[in-house]
Amino acid sequence: MYTDVKFTKKYLDILAKFSSFLVQYSSELPHSQKSQLSTFLSQLQHASRLSLKQLSKNKPLTTTIEIKPNIIFPYKNPVGQKRKFYVSLGGKIEIHNGVITDQSLCLNLMLEHTPNCQNVPSDWKFYDTEQGFHIIRRFHFDYDSLNDDQVKPKFHLQYGGKFNNEYFDLSNVHYKLFQPIDHPRLPQQPHDLIMLLDFVLREFSLKGQEITREKRWNEFVIQSEKLWLTPYYEKLITKLQCGSRITPLHRTK
């Protein structure tokens, strides 16, 4: 299902219409550093339309849609509200010969330390007081078509992972999670760009999240859910109902 040009066309069409809708509402979107969200949406609108045009002419499409730099949103954390917390969204969608082969989306939670910050509480022993932006949580929502669903699940969630300062349009970014660890890959339902952006706006109560109450916004989220989640759960149900299955659910092709 996912390794199908028709699937790619449907998804690019949703992305093109979603980004076009939000470009019109740019003044009402959540605040992001250096207007990164608005800039990315304009880029997404152009990239998805261009890719659709190429596919409609039956031309081979190989491209990468990137969220680069990461889109950084300030938010208020329930604990330590006087400190500067941020959540960022980054990642990429890779398309080869008209098929989505890889989608890696990342959420980072960051804490900024400045000379004017209050003293660090005694129970925050993990916290480094070096000035700059500290990545304290990092989650990957990945789809890799090359994974076999036995050793590595195609759809999975990872904590930590490899990091590159080029992901951010910031100086003094500190990442001290242990990068060489590549496990575990937790089987996880698909999360695409639209679903994840919707999650971020709602979960972190960002200013401007009122856009999520718009009927059109929710129509796009539902379209994306149906496209990505329907084949995923249909396959899981088929596996659950298989009387001859001899391996665990997430270790079965």
Image: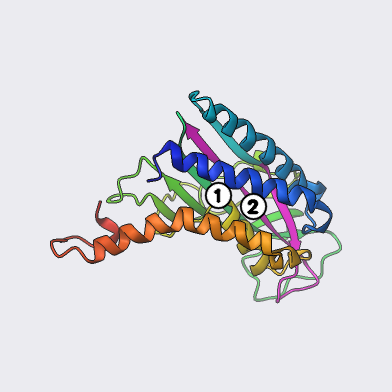
Q: Amino acid at mark 1?
A: Leu
Callouts 1 and 2 close, C-beta under 8 Å: yes
Residue pictured at 52% horizontal, 53% vertical: 140
Measured as percent of width and height from the top left, residue 243 is found at 15, 65
Residue pictured at 53% horizontal, 52% vertical: 192
Task: Judge by depth and name the residue closer to the eye, 71 or 131.
Answer: 71
* Side of 57 where 123 appears, left or right: right
Can you name the residue that lies furthest to the front here? 56
Measured as percent of width and height from the top left, residue 6 is found at 45, 39
User: Predominant secondary structure in magenta?
Assistant: strand
> Where are the magenta residues, as a range?
68-96
Determine which residue is flagged by label 2. 89
Task: Judge by depth and name the residue closer to the eye, 83 or 20.
Answer: 20
Can you name the residue that lies furthest to the right here? 116
Determine which residue is flagged by label 1. 105
Residue pictured at 42% horizontal, 60% vertical: 188
* Side of 47 where 243 appears, left or right: left
Q: Amino acid at mark 2?
A: Leu
Measured as percent of width and height from the top left, residue 209 is found at 73, 65
* Side of 130 where 92 appears, left or right: left
Task: Judge by depth and name the residue closer to the eye, 212 or 33.
Answer: 212
Residue pictured at 63% horizontal, 31% vertical: 50
The answer to whether residue 184 of the structure is visible from this angle is: no
Can you name the residue that lies furthest to the left here? 244
